[in-house]
């Protein structure tokens, strides 16, 4: 199965293909790991709508996702699942972690600006 373009129909299959956790015991654990995408989305939603940035927690979730789903898989899934208004903050976190791929089919990464406030907060770490 080719995953050149993620859709809701092939998202779980793509996640399974990218998943690399030899200690995973069952599907429940896989879905718990995949839920980290929802946590990142909630945290970025709070940042965009209320100005509350929990940068260390976001970094932690993205690092775990990257370790479980590969950097490319993580970036592709996050850009797919997160609202477009969250892309600048997401790009900033991925650049900070040196986990931003050169290209993702669904997103023109070069057209997504970085978030200056997130950049400032990450430099303070």
Image (spheres, rainbow, N blue to C red):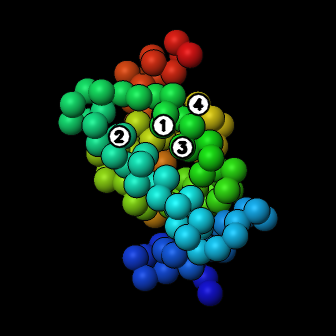
Cα separation between marks 4 and 2: 16 Å
Rendered location of residue 12, percent (x, y): 51, 75
Q: Are marks 2 and 1 in contact (CB under 8 Å)?
A: yes
In the rendered image, which quarter is residue 20 located in? bottom right
Residue 110 versus residue 67: which sits nearer the camera? 67
Q: Write down the residue under mark 4.
A: 96
Cα separation between marks 2 and 1: 8 Å
Cα separation between marks 3 and 4: 14 Å
Tag of residue 44 = 2
Q: Are marks 4 and 1 in contact (CB under 8 Å)?
A: no
Q: Write down the residue under mark 3.
A: 61
Image position of 21 with respect to 51: above or below: below
Name the residue at the right extreme.
Answer: 22
Rendered location of residue 22, percent (x, y): 78, 65
Q: Crowding at label 1, few (<14), some or many (≥20) Cα neighbours within 10 Å?
A: many
Q: Crowding at label 2, few (<14), some or many (≥20) Cα neighbours within 10 Å?
A: many
Image position of 58 with respect to 13: above or below: above
Rendered location of residue 112, percent (x, y): 41, 43
Identity of the residue drawn at 46% across and 28% down: 55
Q: Crowding at label 4, few (<14), some or many (≥20) Cα neighbours within 10 Å?
A: some
Q: Write down the residue under mark 1.
A: 58
Rendered location of residue 76, percent (x, y): 53, 59
Identity of the residue drawn at 66% across and 67% down: 18
Which is more N-terminal, label 1 or label 2?
2
């Amino acid at each position: 199965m080719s995953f050149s373009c993620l859709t809701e129909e092939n998202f779980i299959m793509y996640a399974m293909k990218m998943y690399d956790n030899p200690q995973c015991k069952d599907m429940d654990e896989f879905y718990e790991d995949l839920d980290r995408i929802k946590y990142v989305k909630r945290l970025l939603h709070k940042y965009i709508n209320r100005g509350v940035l929990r940068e260390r927690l976001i970094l932690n979730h993205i690092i775990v996702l990257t370790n479980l789903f590969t950097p490319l898989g993580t970036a592709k899934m996050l850009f797919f699942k997160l609202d477009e208004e969250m892309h600048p903050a997401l790009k900033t976190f991925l650049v900070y972690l040196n986990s931003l791929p050169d290209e993702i089919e669904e997103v023109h990464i070069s057209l997504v600006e970085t978030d200056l406030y997130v950049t400032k907060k990450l430099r303070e770490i």
